[in-house]
Image (cartoon, rainbow, N blue to C red):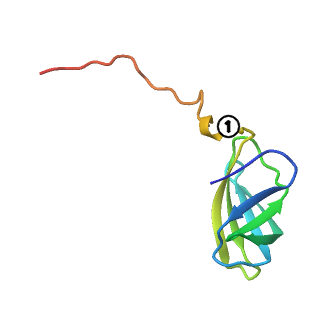
Amino acid sequence: MHILHTTAVNQTIAFIPRAYVGIVNVDLYDTNRKSTISFSASTIAEDGYLKITNSYSLEEGNFYHFNVYDLINNLLYRGQIFCTDQNDYKNYDMNISRYTTNNDKDTIIII
């Protein structure tokens, strides 16, 4: 999973593709809005990764699926993005204050 921020500056997605090409088409699917944004981008191949640098309009806490295609629509990569402005990834909990458990009684019955 790739982690991006809500900022409007350029951000880079690095991935290992099925083939290395110079220009790709990207379909970015917003799972909350149920809509797809498509765009073309130039890439940089570096250290075995293909890197796409672009400005993304993302919302905090949303998941996005994205597919990367070459110019003849061959799928190069399929991935997922989570958008957050948090920087402490080790201590980040996306479900904080959303999930509660019912701990009424811890009873043990011995027969």
Q: Nearer the viewer, residue 10 or 99?
A: 10
* Res. 89 visible in picture: yes
> From the viewer's perspective, is residue 99 above or below residue 52?
above
Residue 24 found in image quarter? bottom right
Query: How many badges with numbers are in the image?
Result: 1
Rendering quarter of residue 52: bottom right
Residue located 15% across and 20% down the image:
110
Does residue 5 lie above or below 102 as drawn?
A: below
Query: Residue at the spot x=43%, y=23% of the render?
Result: 102
Q: Where is residue 10 in the image (x, y as percent from the top left)?
A: 85, 55
Where is 6 relative to 39, above or below?
above
In terms of image quadrants, where is residue 14? Answer: bottom right
Q: Describe residue 22's horizontal placement relative to residue 82 as left or right.
A: right
Residue type at numbered disc 1: Asp
The residue at the far front in this view is 47
Q: Residue at x 82, y 54 (%)?
A: 56
Is residue 93 among what the camera can see?
A: no
Q: How far across and how far down the image is residue 27, in percent?
A: 73, 65
Viewport quadrant of the N terminus? bottom right
Q: How far across and down, in percent of the image, does residue 12 sit?
A: 78, 58
The answer to whether residue 54 is left or right of residue 30 is right
Residue corresponding to mark 1: 88
